[in-house]
Structures are given as structure tokens and as C-alpha cells.
Amino acid sequence: MKFLHTADWQIGRVYGFEGESDDHDPAAAMAQARYDAVVRIAGLATSEQVDAVLVAGDVFDKQALSDHSLRRLINAMAGYSGRWILLPGNHDAALAESVWSRLQRLAVLPANIELTLETRVMEYADAGFAILPAPLTQRQTHDDLTEWFDTAETTEGLIRIGLAHGSVAGILAEEIDSPNPIGADRAAQARLDYLALGDWHGTRQIDARTWYSGTPEQDRFKDNDPGNVLLVEIDAPGALPRVTPKRVGRFRWRAQGVEINGSSDVEQLREQLQGLNDTDVVRLHVQGLVDFASSEQLRMLCEEARARAHVFESDLGELRLEPTAADLAAMQVDGALAEVVDELRDMQEQGDQAAVANEALKLLFDLIRREGAGA
């Protein structure tokens, strides 16, 4: 058997970014990218001639999506005519009234798209496999919904595949463990050939038969190998799966922290940001100590990067402005204005007022730069 394992499409996710302009709406483009990722998954499934595409939960980001959004997703899946098997997750749980019930009422589901809305063995004798799904019927549960896998009977000779959405107990970082637990030894206990998981947005192997595929389109600043689907091949029941990550994501998210202490550091940062393009989503945190010239260089560099990247957010709140005597002379800072500058610089040494004083200095020098000291 050969199939694609994917999860956490989060269709309908809303983003909030700075940088929207008359001709650039970064949030809208990233929402569209989630549909585009599904189109690429369909193309990959067709080219690899897989037996099925398994989607391990959170197909949708929320229940309240428009009919238009639901139809768009079905259209995005049209490039693969084989089996799609979709599982509800915590964002799109199979409630009595849910995005799934609305999707069924629209009557737009083709025969090759199957929903796993209840716990039952789903056998596909023609393709040689059986699916054991654990759909979430509420957003959070403290019960392990995969326990029934252990006693589920499947026809001899079929490859057993578990499909679930939640957090493997004791494996992932404690702070991200969800209230939807999954036993760490479930694949072994349930005699599964493969356990396809969703919820963790990065690609991660738990054991030889248990994987998180991660989201196919990165959606947060985490370096956990997102943007993939998994191509899984299993030769026969009991054989170990061969798992190959396949990148389908477009955007690259990166959070970066740098320390700037002069023009040479600014130039080094410029070189690092030269390769940015419209697929980059960057959050830059800058700290350090700069004079006025370096501060101006950094400001211009951030403007250039913002125009180059899809999203570029910069946090300069911890960058301290320390004007030199030459800076003050060049800007004709003297008299009462010089006293204000000296007072603000003294305040920079006081922990409880340092941030406000630093920001005030930046605003003051920006005003002087634009309007002149006389203003």
C-alpha cells in the first residue's frame, strides 16, 4: 500500500499582520495558500499513484465557515480522483451541528471523499487496508479515543492503519500536550502497521509506525519542520512503513533575534536579509546599542526588507539609541533641547523608565531629522 498522510489544513484560518497596503494583503494571500497547498497535495497524490490520502484532523480551522469556503476546498481536492479519507479534529469536531453536517447538506461531496464521523472499522479490501478512525466529537476530551483500536478486529491480510488527532502522552513538550491524549504505545498495542496523527503542526516521528505529518502550509513561528506531507509505503501487514516527507508548503516562517552594536552589525544583518522574497514571513527582534547613523541605517534596512518579504515584522523596542557628540552637533542639538536629551539619556539608566526614555529619544530624533532642531 502507498498513501499520503497529511493533517491540519486549517482551512479558513484568519491571520493578522502589519504591512497591508493598497496592493498587498498578506493575510489574504496566506489564507489562499492553504487552498493552494491542497491543490499541490492532490497533484502529488496523482503523480505518486497512491491508494489514498489520509487527513488526520483539523481540515477546517473553525466551524463557522461560509458555504463558499467549503465548496472551494472540494474544488481544490478535485485533482486527485482516488480516495480521500477525512477525520474531524479539535478545530472541526464532529458536533451534532458542525462544518461536516453542513458539508453533507450541501451535497457537494463526490464519492471518493469519505468522512470518518464515527468510530468504526472501515475496510478497503480492493486496496488491501483497513482504517481505524478516532474522530473527535467535541473540541476537548480527557479520554484516549484510540483505545478501541486495541480490540478492533480487521480481516486477516489487511494493513491496519490508525487515524487520530491529539497529543501523544509523555512525548511532546508538556506545555503543548492537548486535553486529547493518545497512548504512546498505541501502534504496538493495537497491532497497527501505521498510526497517522494530526494536531502537532510540525513533521515528527514518534516511533517506527507513528508519525505526525504536520501542517502542509506553515502557520506559526516554530522551527519544527512544517510544510510537508508524508508519503507512506507498506509492503504487507507487519512490514515496517517507509516514510518520506514531501514538501508542499509555500511560505517560510522565521523568527530571528540579533544584537546590533554599530554599523558593521547592520551591514551583517543586511547580508542576511538579502535573500528574502515574497515567500518569507519574518519576525525580527533587535537589541543592542546604536548611534544615530546606525539607527538610520537599520530603519532603512527594515523598510527594504519589508518591501522584499511577504511579511516582515521588526521589534526594535530593546534597541537603545546612544547618540554621539557628533550626532548632536550635526543635528544642532543645544540649549534647552540638549537638556531634554541629557535628561532622557539619564532616564535610560533607570530600569523602570529605560524603555520609555529610549522610545522618547527615538521619537525626538526622528522629529529633528524630519523637521529640524528649530521645530
Image (cartoon, grey):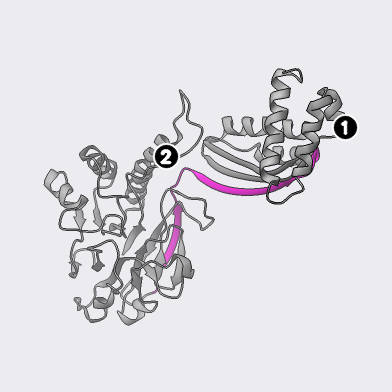
Q: Position of residue 304 (x, y in %)?
A: 63, 30
The stretch in magenta equals: 240-264
Write down the residue under mark 2: 30
Q: Amino acid at mark 2?
A: Met
Q: Is residue 106 left or right of residue 44?
A: left
Q: Is residue 260 magenta?
A: yes
Q: Is residue 194 left or right of residue 176?
A: left
Q: Which mark is residue 325?
A: 1
Q: On screen, 305 above or below 12?
A: above
| Image quadrant in which the N terminus is located | bottom left
Q: Position of residue 150 (x, y in %)?
A: 26, 80
Q: Amino acid at mark 1?
A: Ala
Foreground mark, 1 or 2, reads 1
Using the image as rendered, state which of residue 344 and residue 276 is in the foreground.
344
- Examine the rendering and report whether any part of residue 107 can be seen: no
Quadrant housing residue 361: top right
Q: Is residue 339 magenta?
A: no
Q: CA distance from mark 1 to mark 2?
A: 47 Å
Q: Position of residue 130 (x, y in %)?
A: 23, 69
Q: On screen, 184 above or below 370?
A: below
Q: Position of residue 315 (x, y in %)?
A: 61, 42
Q: Helix or strand or loop: what does disc 1 sit on?
A: helix
Q: Residues within 10 Å of mark 2 (few under 14, many from 20)?
A: many
Q: Is residue 196 left or right of residue 303?
A: left
Picture residue at 46% right of the left edge, 24% below the top: 23
- Examine the rendering and report whether any part of residue 24 can be seen: yes
Q: Main secondary structure of the magenta part?
A: strand
Picture residue at 42% right of the left edge, 42% below the top: 15
Q: Helix or strand or loop: what does disc 2 sit on?
A: helix
- Which badge, 1 or 2, is on the more N-terminal residue? 2
Using the image as rendered, state which of residue 213 and residue 327 is in the foreground.
327
